[in-house]
Amino acid sequence: MFEYDEGALREIAHSVLAFAREFGASDAAVEASESSGLSVNVRKGRVETIEQNRDKGIGVTVYVGQRRGHASSTDFSPQALRETVKAAWEIARHTAEDPCAGLPDEDTLASDPEDPQLFHEWPIDAEQAVALAQRIERAAFDTSPAIRNSDGASVSVSHGHFVLANTRDFSGGYRHSRHTTSCSPIARRGREMQRDDWYSSNCNPDRLADAQALGRYAAERALSRLGARRIATQRVPVLFEAPLACGLLGHFVQAASGGALYRHSSFLVDSLGQRLFPEHLDIVEDPFLPGELGSAPFDSEGVATQRRNVVERGVIEGYFLSTYSARKLGMRTTGNAGGSHNLRFASRQTRPEDSFEAMLRKLGRGLLVTELMGQGVNYVTGDYSRGASGFWVEDGRIAHPVEEITIAGNLREMFGAIVAVGADENTRGTKRTGAGLIGEMGGAGGRAGKRAGRGGVRPTIKGSSSAVCAVSAASIHLTSSDFVSAIRVSMLENRMFVSERSSARSNFVARSVFIAERSSAMSFFVAERNSISSSFVATRSSAMSFFVAERSSVSSSFVAARSSAMSFFVARTCACRL
């Protein structure tokens, strides 16, 4: 599978550090890595793409005092490695000193790191991957005749390993894998089309969602969106589906990251020890969960990771800092160079029975958001404004799908208004949470929604002003029957909506008669106008012909007279010369 084993990568890394010492570097760090992968995509049963990749690379950072230089290469030959180190050294010699630059302190580096068990080989070839993708897409098409099209189904396989080392006697590395299946069906009814998707990703292929279940679930999501309507601008509670609640957690991580904090480009500057969330909420980081994608014994600098409460009882207890950002802030690194590790957003009030249906009942009347669009998050002020679609909920039950809405607010207010977090937990990347219910946000639909999307400090949702953020738990095997049953209720409501539209068709026919009469009158008007226009053009053409003829006659007379005068002048000139 790999061209280089772990021992060979360690040898390469140590030779790079030796070259750095030869050039006179005061410190150096190196990462050597190798990966291989396969990706296939099918659409409507036909293969669209098959990609296979095999990559390797080395990156070296050299310090000359507090001057820093970096260079990389994909050539592992000794000569290429030496030239790469020299390039980094030359860069370091000519850069300005930075008092915060340098390797991590020795007491922060990991010692004897354990394997996080992230490597699970998936021995699947291109033909098998294509067959799996076709099976996923076929399950989507078989769900309903209304699934008429597809953006495709895909299967992705990735394996890799790396070694990280520096001149302060740190050396560590491990193997890792990540495998993904996905499907994006398109539902159609009449002229209306709706698209949705779903995917499953894990380091272990045995923990991926069942192919049939994934395709069927993606199709049911697309079908449930048919008949979507706009909603009036209003303030209501908002329930974020679990995958989107993971996104809200991501916004917190971005705002609490060291880079944003020391640049003063975050609304959470100097927020350590302050309350941001309600008292019942905690955010826990645990990098030591075996087999979870966010697990790591050390960060991308070799600093040891740690289990900690980032938020405890709503109070911010920690940031996400690398060595450099920590020094800029006068603090100590938290081992988050490269990002967060297995963050879990949870409420002390959540009970095992707080399923997705229970979260809908807590929502009561409001907006369930299942898709967000755009990047309208301002981390400096915390202002939040994004396009959204989902479902309108009445009396704790899905009433009908909604679209073309904008939800807007401020992250500080939104975080403080989280009422509940569901037990329907879902993992997206390195973050895990259930559906999130926010007590109040603003929502707008139609033109009013567009205005709300352009600004405003108060939370605004097109159709809903209050956002209730509830995190819903979804099984990794996509067996969330609560959500599917809720979707089916929505589909029944859609059929009722269609019958209402049918009863309104008679009004449409009456309007058609009016339009036909209007079209007849328009035809007469156009004919009259064309007749008048033709007469005008004919008259204008006749006048133009007369004018041209007159002008030609006058011009001919002028030319004849000028020619006669010219002949007389020439004759007199000749006579004078004689």
Image (cartoon, rainbow, N blue to C red):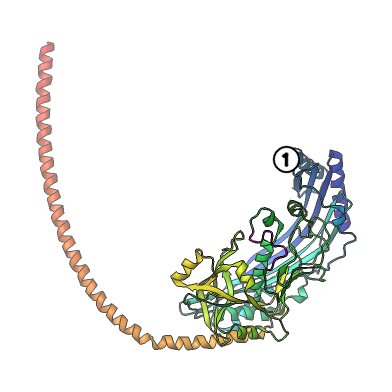
- Whether the magenta-drawn stretch holds residue 273 is answered as yes
User: In the rendered image, which residue does mark 1 sit on?
Assistant: 96
**Quarter location, residue 3:** bottom right
Q: Amino acid at mark 1?
A: Ala
Percent position (x, y) of residue 117?
83, 68
- Whether the magenta-drawn stretch holds residue 151 is answered as no
The residue nearer to you, when weighing 141 against 271, is 271
**Quarter location, residue 422:** bottom right
Is residue 424 placed above or below 56 in the rendered structure? below
Q: Residues within 10 Å of mark 1 (few under 14, many from 20)?
A: few
Is residue 206 placed above or below 65 in the rendered structure? below
Is residue 338 placed above or below 349 in the rendered structure? above
The residue nearer to you, when weighing 103 against 529, is 103
* In this rendering, position of residue 18 left or right of residue 231: right
Q: Main secondary structure of the magenta part?
A: loop
* In this rendering, position of residue 130 left or right of residue 24: left
Looking at the rendering, the stretch of residues picked out in magenta corresponds to 266-275
- Which image quadrant: the N terminus? bottom right
Q: Element type at marker 1?
A: loop
**Residue at the spot 19% in from the left edge and 65% down from the top edge:** 529
The residue nearer to you, when weighing 60 against 522, is 60
The residue nearer to you, when weighing 48 against 77, is 77
**Quarter location, residue 390:** bottom right
* In this rendering, position of residue 280 left or right of residue 465: right
Looking at the image, which residue sits at the far front?
A: 274
* In this rendering, position of residue 503 left or right of residue 248: left
